[in-house]
Image (spheres, rainbow, N blue to C red):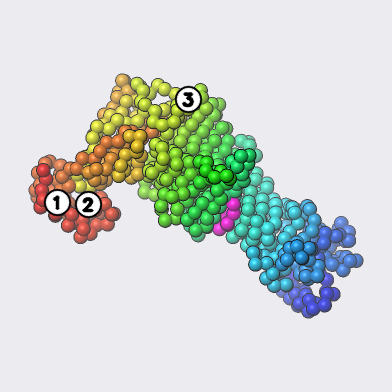
Amino acid sequence: MICAGHLGYGTHTMRTLHTLLLCTITSPAMAQTILVTTTANDVDVPIGATIADLPGPDGVVSFREALRVSDNEPGRQTIGFEIPEERWYLPDIFPGLVILQGATLSASQPVIIDGTTQTAFTGDTNAEGHELLLPLQTYLNGGDTVVTGVHASRVELGGDGSEVYGNTGGMDIRFVNATNGYVHDNEADNINITYSNNCTVVRNVTERVRMTGLGTISPATGNVIGGPDPADRNYITGFGNYGEHGVPAGDCIELYYTDGNLVQNNYIGTTPDGMDISNRACTTGIAIHNYNHNLQILDNLIAVDATNAFGGGDYGVDIYMGLYEGGENIVIKGNTMGLNALGEPVLGGEYGVWVSADAFEEAGDIVIGGQNPGEGNVIAGHDSTGVLMMYPPGVPSNAHVRVSGNSISGNGDIGIDLMPNTWDFGSTPNDLMDADMGANGLQNFPELASATSSGSVTSVEGTLQSAPNQGYFVEFFASPACDASGFGQGERYLGSTSVTTDAGGNAGFAVSLVASTHAGEVVTATATRASTGETSEFSACVAVAGGCIPDLTVDGVLDYFDVSMFLNAYNAMDPLADLTGDGVFDFFDVSAFLNAFNVGCP
C-alpha cells in the first residue's frame, strides 16, 4: 500500500512517516491509502492525477483531490484523514469537529472512506461521536464502497456491495440504484433505500427508514430491515415535525412500491429501551403506501402516540396501509402494538392498524395475525380502534383483510371497526345475506347463544347469517370483561371452527374448544369468509357459564372415566389437563382436578 500525504507539519511528521512506512510494507497490490491533510476544498492537481501527483503545489491533500485520484487509480483505494488542528474549519464555532468544506463531491469507482483515522491522529475531541464531517453531499457510485467513522454527514451510495457502518450523529444514509448494500451499526437521522434491491439494514439507531421503488414497473425488492435474529434489531425512533396549528406529521418506516421485503424484530416509535414514546411528532410507525406486494412485518414492537405541539390532540397509527395502487400477500404477524417492552399497554396512540384502499385497484391476501403460536399480534391500549378499515364512499370491498388469532383488548373503541360507505364509526349491524357495502364487505359477525366452561374445555354455541352457500372460519376469543359497546374485544384466542351457510345464508355451530375460560369471563367471535379472506367485526359478548371442571367426559357423571381421561391427558401433556392454564403440567393441575372431583358437580 502506498500512502500519499504531506510530511511537513512539525510534530505530526514522525506519525505520518510511520503510517507511510507501514502502508508501504504491508500493502497488497492495487490497494493504496490516500491521506487527506486539509479541510479546504481546493484542487491543484490535474484531472488525470494519480498517487504520484500528490500533494499538489500547495503541499496538502484535500478530500476532493483524494476522490479524484482514487477514481484514477486501479483497484479500491482507502482515503484516510490526518488533518492537524491548525487546519480545521471554524474550530471556535464547531469545537472538536473536523468539517470538510465543499457542497457536492463524488466518486465513480470503489473506495473506502475511513474517518477513524482522523480520530487516531488527533484523539477523541468530539464527545458525541466521531470527529470527521464530510461535505454537504457526497455521492459514491462505484459500488464495493465502505464509509465508516464519520459524523453527522450525508452520503449517497450506488452500485453493488457497498457498506456503511460505525458512523455517529445525525447521519443521512442513502442507497440509490444499489444492490446488496449493507447498513449497520450507525447512529442516523435517516436511512433511505431508493430504487435498490437486496439491501440489509440492521443494528442501527435512526429516526426513519424509507424504502422506495421506481413505481409499479420496478419495485424495490429483497430488502431487509432487521431480521430473524433479535440481535439485528434496529431502533427506529421516529421522524416528525409540527406543521400549521401545531399538527404533527412524520413516520418511522415508509414503504413505497416494494415487493418481497422483510421488516422484523425492530423497535419502532419508542426509545431504544422500548419503554416510552421517542418523538411525539411522529404519527405513523409503519406507513405502507401505494403498491406493496409480498411484504412481511414480523415480531416488531411498534408504538406511536403523537400529540399537538400546543398540547392535546389524538394522533398515532402503528401500521397504516394506504393501498391505492394495489397490494398482495402482506403479512403482519407476531408484533406488539401499543405496548412497551414489558408488555404493558401504555404506549398506544389512536389506532393499531388502519387499512384504506382505492376503488380502482384490488388488494388481497392481507393477513393480520395467524392461528399458530407466535403469529397473533397483540394490539392494545389505543385511544380509538384496534383495527380500522376505512374506504372512501362508494368504494367496493377491494381490500380483503384477514384478521386472525390476535389479542385485541383495552382499546378505547371497538376492537375491529369495518366502516360502511357512510363512514359511521362503531359496530355495524348485520344485514340479511350480507349484501351491504363497505370495508371488508361489511362481513357479518356471528351471533353467540352460549359459552360454557368445563375444565380446560370451553363449549360455544351460536349461528352465522351471511352470504348463501359460502364457507366461513369462525374464531373465538375470551376477555375478562365485555367492551362498553357490548361487542368484543378479544384478549385471548381460544380456537376456531368452520361452517358453511345454506341457501338462506344460515349456519349453526356448537363447538368444544380445548381452551380454558372461567365463569364471569366473556366470549366473542369473528367470522372470515373463506373465499375472500374478509374478517368481520367482533360479535356481541356472551358470558361464560361455569361448568363442571372434573367432568372431562361431559356426561354429567364423575367417575373412573373422568379420572382416567385426566391422567392420560396429563401424561401426554395435553392442554386438557392444564387446569391452571399456565402452560405447565405439575402438582397444581393434579391438585385442582382432585379438589374439584371431591367437591363434585351441581
Residue assigned mark 2: 579
Residue 325, above or below 514: above
Task: Tell me the element at label 2.
Answer: loop
Residue assigned mark 3: 421
Stretch of the chain drawn in magenta: 199-207
Residue shown at 69% from the left, 69% from the top:
125
Q: Position of residue 512 (x, y in %)?
A: 23, 40
Disc 2 and disc 1 in contact, CB within 8 angstroms: yes
Task: Tell me the element at label 1.
Answer: helix
Q: Amino acid at mark 3?
A: Asn
- For mark 1, does the 10 Å Cα neighbourhood hold few (<14), some (14 to 19), or many (20 or more) residues? some
Q: Position of residue 554 (x, y in %)?
A: 15, 42
Q: Residue furthest right?
A: 57
- Residue 370 is a magenta residue: no
Instruction: Tell me which numbered mark, 2 or 3, is placed earlier along the sequence.
Output: 3
Residue assigned mark 1: 596
Q: Position of residue 183 (x, y in %)?
A: 61, 56
Q: Amino acid at mark 1?
A: Ala
Q: Amino acid at mark 2?
A: Leu
Q: Position of residue 18 (x, y in %)?
A: 76, 77
Residue shown at 73% from the left, 72% from the top:
121
